Amino acid sequence: MNSFYKEAVPDPHLHIHVRPRYEAPVMVNGRTYIDSEFGHHYAVKKHVEISDKDREEVCTRLKKWLNCCMPVL
């Protein structure tokens, strides 16, 4: 974030990537996803194809969990 303060008009913001990790197979819209790297550091270049519909469902589940389990700042 320090680079944002180098600009004449600072515009700090936070950008994150989320990679859900799971020990047991997860079912999303009838498709099963297995995290073969669970418990290990993931390979940065490894990419799992996921349909737009499944991605939307995962985002919905994450938002629900975050709203339920995380304190409001």
Image (cartoon, helix red, strand yellow):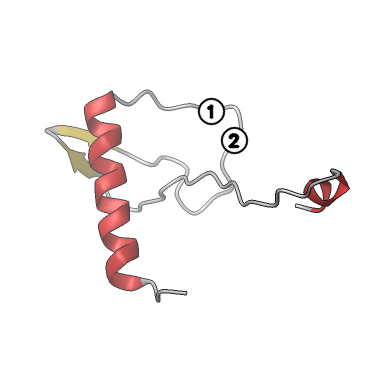
Label 1 sits on residue: 46
Residue 40 vs 49, above or below: the answer is below
Q: Nearer the viewer, residue 56 or 46?
A: 56
Going 18% across and 41% down the picture, which residue do you hit?
27
Can you tell which quarter of the image residue 64 is in? bottom left
Going 32% across and 26% down the picture, which residue do you hit?
50
Going 38% across and 71% down the picture, which residue do you hit?
70
Residue 3 vs 45, above or below: the answer is below
**Marks 1 and 2 close (CB-CB < 8 Å):** yes
**In the image, residue 66 lies at what x, y percent?**
34, 63
Going 28% across and 23% down the picture, which residue do you hit?
51
Label 2 sits on residue: 43
Q: Badge 2 local density, few (<14 within 10 Å), some, or many (20+)?
A: few
Can you tell which quarter of the image residue 68 is in? bottom left
Q: CA distance from mark 1 to mark 2?
A: 5 Å
Give left or right: position of 61 versus 73: left
**In the image, residue 63 lies at what x, y percent?**
31, 54
Q: Badge 1 local density, few (<14 within 10 Å), some, or many (20+)?
A: few
Q: Amino acid at mark 1?
A: Lys
**In the image, residue 31 lies at what x, y percent?**
18, 31
Give left or right: position of 19 versus 50: right
**In the image, residue 43 lies at what x, y percent?**
59, 35
**Helix, strand, or loop for circle 2?**
loop
Q: Amino acid at mark 2?
A: Ala
